[in-house]
Image (cartoon, helix red, strand yellow):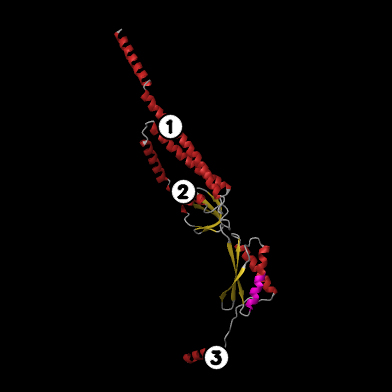
């Protein structure tokens, strides 16, 4: 009986303590503040994510008004990538703050995450370097798919851009695959207009004023025939005085990558015009000397031999 009474008293005592704790206003205030903190953290995180995603979208809308534009596919990919990075970052910070509000020691968690990140960084340095390089290539719009570029010793049309590699297709059919982390210098030929340069070789007997006037008449008709030409081509003048020729230089501003085609068409049109007006091209002249010098050398050799 005594043992039963003791157990009943102990149970009653524990029950009273539990009721006292439940009815303790300080305890409810404490947990109320914790719950309020968690709610505020969740609300602020949601607001930051929404505002951040909207800001990223507006940034790309403003970029669409400038000359350098993203393709729709690249723009959508980059927007999604940035929004995911923002979401994961905010979620991680929110979870750490919630655990801290629950009086859970987050120092060990952060230390473990740091060690894990350090291990991944050491184990995949090249991969991380390539991904970061690819991200900035896309973000800065250094070049796009379809652009004609030169990267180091490789030159061709950009066939594909990834976060890790870039593929360049040469005009002869070779496909170059370059790691984004190794791309340090890029020459992009597709961003601005090109210039076609044509040198016309004339003989010294040609009438320069007449030839220049003839070529200018031909150049004035070229923009009507070829939409790739920007403005009217011009004759710069005498570029060089050679041993047997005079070089006239003609230039024409063209759309990007159209300079080679327009240069060929300019040469053809100018050659036909020169032929029609019987303007000859220069040719090399060989002067052969024969006589006393040769005989004297032979005579001198005979004397020395004698």
Q: Please, what secondary structure does the residue beneath circle 1 have?
A: helix
Point out the residue furthest to the left here: 2
Q: In the image shown, does 230 or 119 lie closer to the viewer?
A: 230
Numbered mark located on residue 161 in the image: none
Sequence-wise, which precedes: disc 2 or disc 3? 2
Residue 129 rendering spot, x and y as whole percentages: 45, 49
State the residue at coordinates (39%, 27%): 31
Instruction: Tell me which corner region of the image, top left, top right, bottom left or bottom right, holds residue 100.
Output: top left
Q: Residue at x 64, y 68 (%)?
A: 267
Choose between 4 and 20: the one closer to the eye: 20
The answer to whether residue 83 is above or below residue 292 is: above
SS class, disc 3: helix
Q: Quadrant of the N terminus?
A: top left
Q: In the image, is residue 173 above or below residue 122?
A: below
Q: Which mark is residue 292?
A: 3
Judge whether residue 116 is colored magenta: no
Which mark is drawn over residue 132? Answer: 2
The first of marks 1 and 3 along the sequence is 1
Among the two numbered marks 2 and 1 on one chain, the one whose residue lies closer to the N terminus? 1
Q: Which residue is mark 1?
A: 38
Q: Position of residue 90 (x, y in %)?
A: 45, 39
> Depth check: 74 or 122 in front?
74
Q: Tell me the distance, in whole angstroms, between the alpha carbons under discs 2 and 1.
A: 34 Å
Q: Tell me where residue 172 sits by quadrant.
A: bottom right
Residues in magenta?
Answer: 206-217
- Spatial CA span between label 1 and label 3: 112 Å
Whether residues under marks 2 and 1 lie with C-beta atoms below 8 angstroms apart, the answer is: no
Nearer the observer: mark 2 or 1; the answer is 1
Neighbor class of circle 3 (other Cα within 10 Å; few <14, some 14-19, many 20+) is few
């Amino acid at each position: 009986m005594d043992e039963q009474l003791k157990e009943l008293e102990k149970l009653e005592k524990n029950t009273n303590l539990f009721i006292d704790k439940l009815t303790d206003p300080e305890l409810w205030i404490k947990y109320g503040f914790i719950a309020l903190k968690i709610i505020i953290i969740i609300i602020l995180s949601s607001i930051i994510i929404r505002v951040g995603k909207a800001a990223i979208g507006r940034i790309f809308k403003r970029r669409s008004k400038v000359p350098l534009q993203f393709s729709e596919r690249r723009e959508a990919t980059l927007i999604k990538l940035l929004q995911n990075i923002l979401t994961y970052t905010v979620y991680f910070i929110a979870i750490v703050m919630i655990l801290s509000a629950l009086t859970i020691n987050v120092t060990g968690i952060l230390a473990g995450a740091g060690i894990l990140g350090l291990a991944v960084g050491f184990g995949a340095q090249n991969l991380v370097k390539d991904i970061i390089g690819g991200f900035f290539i896309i973000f800065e719009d250094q070049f796009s798919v379809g652009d004609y570029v030169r990267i180091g010793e490789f030159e061709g049309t950009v066939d594909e851009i990834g976060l890790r590699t870039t593929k360049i297709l040469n005009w002869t059919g070779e496909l170059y695959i370059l790691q984004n982390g190794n791309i340090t210098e890029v020459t992009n030929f597709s961003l601005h207009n090109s210039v076609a340069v044509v040198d016309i070789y004339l003989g010294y007997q040609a009438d320069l004023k007449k030839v220049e006037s003839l070529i200018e008449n031909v150049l004035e008709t070229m923009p009507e025939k070829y939409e790739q030409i920007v403005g009217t081509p011009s004759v710069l003048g005498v570029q060089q005085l050679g041993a047997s020729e005079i070089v006239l230089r003609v230039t024409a501003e063209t759309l990007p990558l159209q300079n080679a085609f327009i240069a060929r068409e300019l040469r053809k049109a100018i050659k036909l015009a020169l032929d029609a007006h019987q303007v000859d091209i220069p040719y090399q002249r060989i002067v052969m000397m024969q006589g006393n010098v040769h005989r004297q050398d032979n005579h001198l050799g005979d004397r020395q031999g004698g």
